RNA sequence: GCCUGGGUGGCGGAAUAGGUAGACGCAAGGGACUUAAAAUCCCUUGGGGCGCGUCCCCGUGCGGGUUCGAUUCCCGCCCCAGGCACCA
């Protein structure tokens, strides 16, 4: 027995210390050391190399809000494991990081601190960069970018001009969603239930001249690819995008107005019910409303109604219990199919933004129309009969919206309604009464923002020439960084005369003025992944060769909150670049992982409201408010948020535990796509495990020094060495498949924990034939498998075990099939499906003998008794089920 | 209302070709080491029952079904989370 084992752990430690291994695991020293090593050796600098297979791993870049939060830590830890794993698997990995640096919080903070958005932003970037570096993420920092720098946004302006040239951008006066608090316009996507997505203020409509991107031109393409070409995306996200695009296939139908030379056009998805249309409803904003009311004696009433509806705020109008209200305009139109005379109403449930703003109402087969008809006593005509039933308008309590057979529909009677849809669409087209039509919920992307801290829109307003694009050679239009914000957070751009006044690019007139709107910050984040491929390139948006090599992103990782906005815009932008001939692909992100939220229970004091974790004191079993001593109400697990104060600051965690422990906890506590519940005890557990790994290496270091990790055939081993060798390879297999197939790092970590437990329990293995080599293999494997997860500790132990740095560039271990084989297998025996016994049988035993062994087993016989055996089911190497 | 997920011990979570439910960790309990504590190491731990066993019964939200066998597949419900919502 080696000297060290006889003498116990104390001797081990002194040996270890003599050779330079610290007795205790000290994360801080180790982490600083290896972060420096990585940086000095430019270990994660990515270079194009066509001879190697590339892997582009991207995490959603952060907004530089001040300091990183747990959501960042989790997101970037997941990404880092994949990046490091892929590197070890031999891929040429691109793993960049940067800053989504424009946006309103910078302006708000500047006002609050009497500072400047630029100052605030750059300071935050510096601080957060340090934080990310101290997490040990394997970013190629040489590619870092910040979207608020002119070198970045000049290419965004350049693209804007290209799009303008191609008619992909336009300007129009329109009702926009206006947030008074933010003093700006919001895209439809940024309005949540009638409230501003950022500050929760009620959004109101305002008429403004706005710039729009024609994203709706791509609605069908975006939709089609959602189904066919995004298999690497979570179904949930694809579904959300599909719903958002909201394609409806139907028909346009023209309804002539009685005694007037006016036609009302409607869009419907149920042209099969056209014979049942008994009245017409127009949106209150519909231009025909005042016109139709004219001369009917109802003008004043109609005007009052429209005004009142306009004041109904959007939030209430969308509420479920909202009362349907309408007004008869005094006019009639004619149903072109049935010839029926239909009264024309205006009503609050018709939306001007969708379809044509007019609805043919079929109260028998549409629930909204049904409710409206009941309220105003309008006619009901059944035109679809359900199979085996006969609806009677007099007794109907709700609309029938399912399939059936047409009645009261002239030549279409007796036809199935699905067929009737086509037949009626044909007839409409043939007779010029309308035709097939497709509508989308998705509307064009309004990108104008009346804010300062954003990319200036490169346009000029000339009194003579109108709106004129800035000349390409005059880019970038630099945002003046010395401007001070106006009271109320208003943009200073419209009053900055020096900046504002510019000669007209077209006629040269001196008093032209710049566009003062800036772009929605979602524009910057719609192409940053392409810019990362060649971030310093100054001849265009990106270097073609670099983009051809790196793009598309192989794996994108971020929060599900961007499922619609950012991801849809990015897909749209990539199509624009594609159609401009700049990229060869349409989808930017091949695979997408949306990680769950980081949650923690809330704590609330009856007096002081929500409490931060450090405002809660533990008194025995109870928790009390640190300020007033009142018992704390512990709420349910919720997403960490400043407003609920249930937050944990990664900065403090880093100080207390170091990066590896925090990383390990984030990965081990739950699989990435699910929510992560914060647990202090869990972090302690992670710390304990890493200490255990450290001590394991310290303990066995002497045993394995000079021993070459065993890589020979399994059958030259026996006893404990053979068992350990099997466990090593089984662990390699499990960890590899867990990471490779489904990013289940939690089970990967469990597997390594099992291996570590086994090594602890394998005392004496070093005395076996090849025992020291197998032990060396086991220790080395633990370190290699942990390398992507806890990189600093792994680097340190890799070196301690006598290897040259860096483990980050070491090849990922391979498992040997022959090592996994066992001489005997455990076969479970069931009687009628219930577990009754277990048998250890030779791995190569034939089925018949296993069956006989099972039937002979005393436990089995007890349950079989003298009942006749009907059937015996054998699953080789696993199970025997005796059916009696 | 519609569309996604999800419901498994005291807790986080395992079990992805239908085949030993509860891996791994946390918490709890017991033991070893220590003058003592911390740390560490080892053991126990779904519920119930008794003859304490290689024992029996129950058990993966609820109710049915398919199957030799169901956490896994099918049908019908309940609950939780997220998304969409008067979109014609």
Image (cartoon, rainbow, N blue to C red):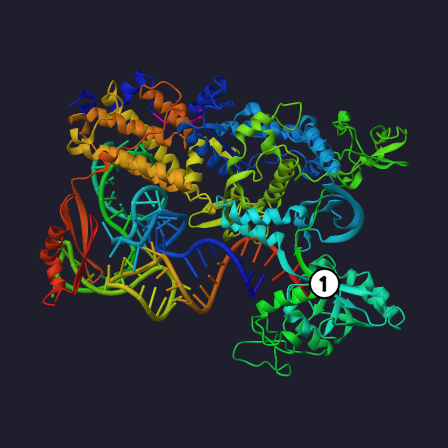
The residue at 84%/35% (across/down) is: A495
Res A253 seen here: no
Residue A648 within the magenta-colored segment of the rendering: no
Q: Which residues are magenta?
A: A24-28
The C terminus of chain A - image quarter: bottom left
Judging by the rendered image, the residue that carries numbered circle 1 is: A434
The residue at 75%/30% (across/down) is: A479
Disc 1 residue crowd, few under 14, some 14–19, many 20+, Cα 10 Å: many
Q: Is residue A369 above or below residue A246?
A: below
- Viewer-proximal residue, A114 or A392? A392
Residue A773 locus on image (x, y percent): 22, 24
Residue A324: quadrant of the picture: bottom right
| Count of picture labels | 1
Residue A650 locus on image (x, y percent): 51, 35
Residue A25 within the magenta-colored segment of the rendering: yes
The answer to whether residue A596 is left or right of residue A223 is: left
Residue A237 locus on image (x, y percent): 54, 49
């Amino acid at each position: 027995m080696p000297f060290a084992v006889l003498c116990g752990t104390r001797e081990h430690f002194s040996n270890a210390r003599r050779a330079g291994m610290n007795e205790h695991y000290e994360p801080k020293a180790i982490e600083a050391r290896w972060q420096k090593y990585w940086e000095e050796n430019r270990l994660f600098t990515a270079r194009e190399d066509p001879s190697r297979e590339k892997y582009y791993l991207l995490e959603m870049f952060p907004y530089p809000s001040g300091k990183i939060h747990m959501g960042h830590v989790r997101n970037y830890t997941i990404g880092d494991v994949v990046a490091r794993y892929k590197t070890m698997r031999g891929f040429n990995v691109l793993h960049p990081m940067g800053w989504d640096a424009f946006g309103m919080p910078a302006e708000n903070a500047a006002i609050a601190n009497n500072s400047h958005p630029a100052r605030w932003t750059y300071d935050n970037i510096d601080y957060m960069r340090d934080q990310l570096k101290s997490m040990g993420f394997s970013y190629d920092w040489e590619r870092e970018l910040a979207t608020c720098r002119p070198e970045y946004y000049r290419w965004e302006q350049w693209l804007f001009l290209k799009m303008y040239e191609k008619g992909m951008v336009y300007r129009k006066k329109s009702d926009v969603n206006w947030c008074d608090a933010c003093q700006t316009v919001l895209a439809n996507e940024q309005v949540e239930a009638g409230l501003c997505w950022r500050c929760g203020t009620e959004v109101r409509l305002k008429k403004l001249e706005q710039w729009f991107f024609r994203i709706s031109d791509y609605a069908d393409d975006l939709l089609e690819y959602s189904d066919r070409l995004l298999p690497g995306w979570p179904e949930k996200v694809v579904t959300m995008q599909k719903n958002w695009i909201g394609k409806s296939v139907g028909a346009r139908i023209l309804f002539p107005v009685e005694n007037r030379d006016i036609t009302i056009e409607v869009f419907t998805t149920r042209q099969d019910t056209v014979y049942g249309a008994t009245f017409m409803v127009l949106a209150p904003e519909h231009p025909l409303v005042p016109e139709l009311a004219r001369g009917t004696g109802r003008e004043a009433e109609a005007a009052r109604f429209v005004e009142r509806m306009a004041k109904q705020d959007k939030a209430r109008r969308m509420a479920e219990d909202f009362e349907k209200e309408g007004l008869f305009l005094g006019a009639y139109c004619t149903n072109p199919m049935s010839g029926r005379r239909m009264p024309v109403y205006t009503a609050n449930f018709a939306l001007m933004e969708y379809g044509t703003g007019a609805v043919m109402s079929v109260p028998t087969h549409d629930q909204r129309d049904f409710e409206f008809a009941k309220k105003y006593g309008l006619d009901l005509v059944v035109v679809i009969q359900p199979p085996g039933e006969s609806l009677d308008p007099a007794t109907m309590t709700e609309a029938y919206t399912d399939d059936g057979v047409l009645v009261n529909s002239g030549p279409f009677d007796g036809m199935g309604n699905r067929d009737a849809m086509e037949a009626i669409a044909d007839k409409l087209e043939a007779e010029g009464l309308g035709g097939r039509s497709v509508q989308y919920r998705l509307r064009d992307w309004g990108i104008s923002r009346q804010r300062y801290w954003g990319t200036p829109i490169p346009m000029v307003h000339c009194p003579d020439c109108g709106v004129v694009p800035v000349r390409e050679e005059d880019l970038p239009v630099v945002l003046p960084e010395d401007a001070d914000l106006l009271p109320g957070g208003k943009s200073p751009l419209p009053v900055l005369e020096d900046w504002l006044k510019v000669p007209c690019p077209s006629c040269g007139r001196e008093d032209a003025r710049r566009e003062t709107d800036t772009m929605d910050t979602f524009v910057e984040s719609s192409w940053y992944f392409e810019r990362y491929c060649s971030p310093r390139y100054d001849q265009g948006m990106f270097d073609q060769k670099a983009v051809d090599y790196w793009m598309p992103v192989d794996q994108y990782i971020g929060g599900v909150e961007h499922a619609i906005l950012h991801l849809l815009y990015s897909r749209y932008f990539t199509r624009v670049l594609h159609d401009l001939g700049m990229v060869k692909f349409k989808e930017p992100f091949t695979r997408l992982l949306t990680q769950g939220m980081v949650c923690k229970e809330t704590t609330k004091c009856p007096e002081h409201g929500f409490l931060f974790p450090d405002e809660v004191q533990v008194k025995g079993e109870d928790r009390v408010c640190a300020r007033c001593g009142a018992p704390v109400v512990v709420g349910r697990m919720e997403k960490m948020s400043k407003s609920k104060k249930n937050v944990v600051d990664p900065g403090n965690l880093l100080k207390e535990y170091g990066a590896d422990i925090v990383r390990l906890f984030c990965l081990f506590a739950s699989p990435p796509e699910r929510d992560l519940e914060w647990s202090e005890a869990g972090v302690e557990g992670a710390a304990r495990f890493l200490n255990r790994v450290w001590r394991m290496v310290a303990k066995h270091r002497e045993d394995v020094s000079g021993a070459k990790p065993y890589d020979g055939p399994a059958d030259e081993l026996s006893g404990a060495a053979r068992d350990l060798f099997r466990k090593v390879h089984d662990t390699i297999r499990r960890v590899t498949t867990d990471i490779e197939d489904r990013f289940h790092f939690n089970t990967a970590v469990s597997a390594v924990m099992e291996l570590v437990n086994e090594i602890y329990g394998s005392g004496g293995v070093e005395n076996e034939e090849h025992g020291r080599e197998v032990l060396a293999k086991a220790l080395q494997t633990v370190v290699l498998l942990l390398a992507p997860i806890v990189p600093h500790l792994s680097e340190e132990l890799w070196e301690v075990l006598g290897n040259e740095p860096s483990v980050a560039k070491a090849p990922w271990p391979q498992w040997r099939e022959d090592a996994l084989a066992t001489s005997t297998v455990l076969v479970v025996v069931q009687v009628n499906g219930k577990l009754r016994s277990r048998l250890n049988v030779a791995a190569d035993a034939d089925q018949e003998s296993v069956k006989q062994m099972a039937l002979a087993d005393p436990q089995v016989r007890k349950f079989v008794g003298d009942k006749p055996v009907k059937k015996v089911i054998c699953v080789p190497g696993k199970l025997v089920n005796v059916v009696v």
